[in-house]
Each structure stands twice: as C-alpha cells, then as structure tokens.
Image: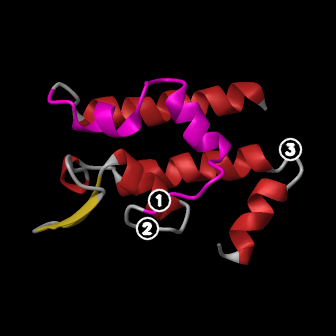
Amino acid sequence: MPRDTVALYEAPKETAPSHDVWVLDEMARLLATPEQWCKGAYQTQKREGQAYCIVGAYSAATGHGGDRLYYPPGAAWLALLQQVKTLATFNDDPATTHADILALIARARASLLDRS
C-alpha cells in the first residue's frame, strides 16, 4: 500500500471529508460524459478514450486504477454505498443510465458535506 494513501486514513477527522469530496469530484470528472462511462468492466478503452464504471472511477480517483480497491474504504466509498446496495450491480443494471451514475455521486457528495 503506498505510504501517501495511509496518511489519508490516519488524518484527523476534520481533514478527511475534504479529501473524500475531492475523490467524488474526481470520479464525476472521470465519468463526465456517457462516453467516459462503461458497464461490465472496471475500465475499458473506447474510441473516444478511457471509460470507467463507477467502481473503476473510484479506484482511479484514489490512485489505484483498474479493479484494485483500497481498503479500508474511505468516506467517499461509504457515502456511495449509503445510496445503493452494491455499486457494481447498480452500475451494470440495464436500467441504470449515465445520469443515474452522476446523480449518485452528487448525492454522496452532498451527504459528505452535510456531515462536515
């Protein structure tokens, strides 16, 4: 585990929410357009460039990329899970749209800001 990521989870409570909000903002940036979002894979290369599912975007935003998640999960991950039962299932559900993914991230972000 990279040393700089350990510091995040050992940080005082007052500094962690701003980092977790940044993670959610970075996820929203990585998933900004429908072309940057995918289902059925953590990340994939499309003609338009790199695309991520919501789990892949979290991994990329936390600096781990691919299908490797950082544990223990941060407050951003937990805020997302307060909204849906499992992120991968929600992402890959045929009824889930790109707008649903961005709305989920926005709700998780608002939840973090409400707590700080």
The answer, for residue 40, to whether it is visible in the render is yes
Q: Nearer the viewer, residue 68 or 36?
A: 68
Between label 2 and label 3, give the one nearer the viewer.
2
Where's the C terminus, which quadrant? Answer: top right
User: Closer to the N terminus: mark 1 or mark 3?
Assistant: 3
Q: Amino acid at mark 3?
A: Lys
Identify the residue at image location x=69%, y=67%.
Answer: 5
How many residues crowd around disc 1 within 10 Å: few (fewer than 14), some, or many (20 or more)? Answer: many
Q: Amino acid at mark 1?
A: Ser
Identify the residue at image location x=75%, y=27%.
Answer: 115
Q: Nearer the viewer, residue 84 or 37?
A: 84
| Residue occupied by mark 3 | 13
Q: Amino acid at mark 2?
A: Gly
**Residue 100 at x, y = what percent?**
31, 29
Q: Left or right? Give the position of 80 relative to 103.
A: right
Q: Secondary structure at mark 2?
A: loop
Q: Residue furthest left?
A: 47
| Residue occupied by mark 2 | 65
Position above or below: 96 against 41:
above
Could you tell me how far apart the alpha carbons at marks 1 and 3 are, in whole angstroms? Answer: 22 Å
- Circles 2, 3 touching at the beta carbon (< 8 Å): no
Where's the N terminus, which quadrant? Answer: bottom right
- Please tell me the numbered disc located at residue 2: none
Q: Left or right? Give the position of 95 relative to 110.
A: left
**Residue 79 at x, y = what percent?**
58, 32
User: Closer to the N terminus: mark 1 or mark 2?
Assistant: 1
| Magenta segment boundaries in residue numbering | 68-94
| Residue occupied by mark 1 | 59
